[in-house]
Image (spheres, rainbow, N blue to C red):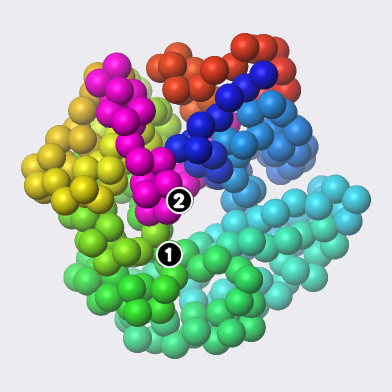
Amino acid sequence: MTVISPLLRGLCDDAALFPPGNAPLAEAVPSHQSYLEAGYSALVGPFVFPAPRLDELSAHISADHPVALSLTVPAGPDATAAAVAKALAIPGVDVVAVEVGTPSGVAADHAFDELARIHAAYPYIDIFVEVPRDDRRDSYIAALEKAGYSAKFRTGGVQAEAYPDENELADAIISVVRAGIPFKATAGLHHAVRNTDPDTGFEQHGFLNILSAVGAAATGADRSDVVAALAERDGTTIAHSVSELDDQDVRRRFLSFGTCSISDPLTELEDLGLINRSEKTEGTLA
């Protein structure tokens, strides 16, 4: 039996199709179904799917084997309504969330006018808006607070500059925690604890570090403490820190992160003593 604490439930969105995993769609869909049937299913969130690939999806799912999507729309708000409509027209697809990109030049006023129309048409779909890392950040966060949508922070990628350092990420976390804006994170969170990738040399954030940082920000800690939580590299220290968090308070703020592997976070959480999986052979891990 696998015991998933409230702190970890639904934390891992299945982003198997995205780098560096880049799983073939024909493998990723059945793998996702197997995760939802396994003893650790409570850890797993929706299947993250890129809108530009919707034409491929109908060949791999059916009404008998439905899938809940978090639909990413990198082209931005103007392309989101059409993407949602196209996804919902596929038998077996349920769109539970959209993750809306914010391309260069798209101002917050324009973006949120369009998102308001989408929310009116699909009030049951959660809206995540990627917060730009440029001078638009404050205006987007103010608009998110007013609209009541959730934020999405990009925490890595295939180039070093895609990774915000701990100071930049701390400021982003503090801003949304103080504004009461829930958020998810995407890209670069390949391990539970802060690390240096041995192949690329990239400094990678740990998803448990983000939980710890959110806990610190939520209790009014100094900025330096939030930065320190993101910078901590000792797994035992981080595991102890998150074990003492207020589960409900932290998880209503940090909703999930996208991971191209479900097996990696599951194994690392078990190794750190945060998941008890007594039957290691249960379920199928791709």
User: Label 1 amino acid?
Assistant: Ser
Q: Which residue is mark 2?
A: 255
Residue 177, percent from left and from top = 27, 58
Residue 217, percent from left and from top = 21, 49
Residue 179 is inside the magenta segment: no
- Quarter of the C terminus within the rendering: top right
- Quarter of the N terminus within the rendering: top right
Q: Check whether the beta carbons of the residues at disc 2 and disc 1 lie within 8 A of each other.
A: yes
Q: Which residues are magenta?
A: 236-262
Which residue shows up at 17% across the image and 43% down it? 226
Which residue shows up at 21% across the image and 48% down it? 219
For the residues labelled 2 and 1, the Cα–Cα distance comes to 9 Å
Q: Which label sits on residue 150? A: 1
- Can residue 156 be seen here? The reply is no
Q: Is residue 10 above or below residue 92?
A: above
Residue 255 is inside the magenta segment: yes
Residue 57, percent from left and from top = 76, 55
User: Label 2 amino acid?
Assistant: Leu
